[in-house]
Image (spheres, rainbow, N blue to C red):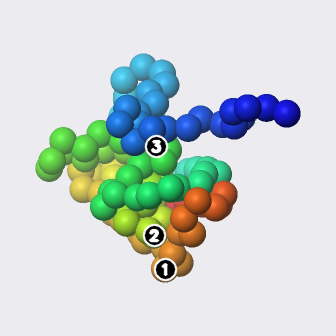
């Protein structure tokens, strides 16, 4: 029996995983995108990103992110400099493995 989970566990302090090179906005999808994630959240913050390719420097926003606002999933996409955010109506259950998907 394994003593640790077969998953990525973030500690809430150093909670960023960066993969790949810095974002190149010319390579972002132009028409369709789908992102999906399985996770169990112990707690949330006002804004949290689960998976995405996003640059948010105040008024300069580019990319996409599948995340949450408080205890609701959200999907944010920006193609013209401002994020458009869609929020799910359902409440995320704490500490239960759930799936979320964003599609454009």
Q: Secondary structure at mark 1?
A: loop
Task: Tell me residue 91's x, y (percent).
Answer: 51, 75
Q: Which of the two labelled residues, at mark 3 and mark 2, occupies the earlier sequence position?
A: 3
* Closest to the observer, 87 or 104: 87
Q: Residues within 10 Å of mark 3 (few under 14, many from 20)?
A: some
Q: Nearer the viewer, mark 3 or mark 2?
A: 2
Q: Quadrant of residue 9?
A: top right
Q: Quadrant of residue 95?
A: bottom right
Cβ atoms under marks 2 and 1 closer than 8 Å = yes
Q: Is residue 88 above or below residue 101?
A: below
Q: Which of the two labelled residues, at mark 2 and mark 1, occupies the earlier sequence position?
A: 2
Task: Tell me residue 86's x, y (percent).
Answer: 41, 69
* Residue identified by numbered label 2: 72
Q: Is residue 62 above or below residue 73?
A: above
* Marks 2/1: CA–CA distance: 7 Å
Cβ atoms under marks 3 and 2 closer than 8 Å = no
Q: Secondary structure at mark 2?
A: strand
Q: Residue at x 25, y 44 (%)?
A: 56
In which quadrant will I find the N terminus?
A: top right
Q: Which of the two labelled residues, at mark 3 and mark 1, occupies the earlier sequence position?
A: 3
* Residue identified by numbered label 3: 52
Residue that lies at the very extreme toward the top in this rendered image: 21
Q: Quadrant of residue 96?
A: bottom right
* Closest to the observer, 87 or 81: 87
Residue 2 left/right relative to 27: right
Task: Tell me residue 59's x, y (percent).
Answer: 14, 49
Q: Residues within 10 Å of mark 1 (few under 14, many from 20)?
A: few
* Marks 3/2: CA–CA distance: 17 Å
* Closest to the observer, 79 or 8: 8
* Residue identified by numbered label 1: 89
- Mark yes or no: residue 76 visible: no
């Amino acid at each position: 029996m394994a003593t640790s989970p077969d998953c990525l566990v973030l500690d809430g302090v150093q909670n960023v995983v960066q993969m790949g090179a810095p974002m190149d906005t010319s390579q972002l999808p132009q028409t369709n995108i789908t992102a999906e994630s399985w996770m169990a959240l112990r707690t949330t913050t006002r804004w949290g990103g689960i998976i995405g390719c996003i640059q948010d420097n105040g008024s300069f926003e580019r990319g996409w992110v599948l995340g949450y606002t408080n205890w609701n999933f959200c999907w944010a996409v920006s193609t013209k400099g401002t994020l458009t955010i869609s929020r799910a109506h359902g409440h995320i259950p704490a500490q239960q493995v759930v799936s979320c998907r964003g599609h454009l």
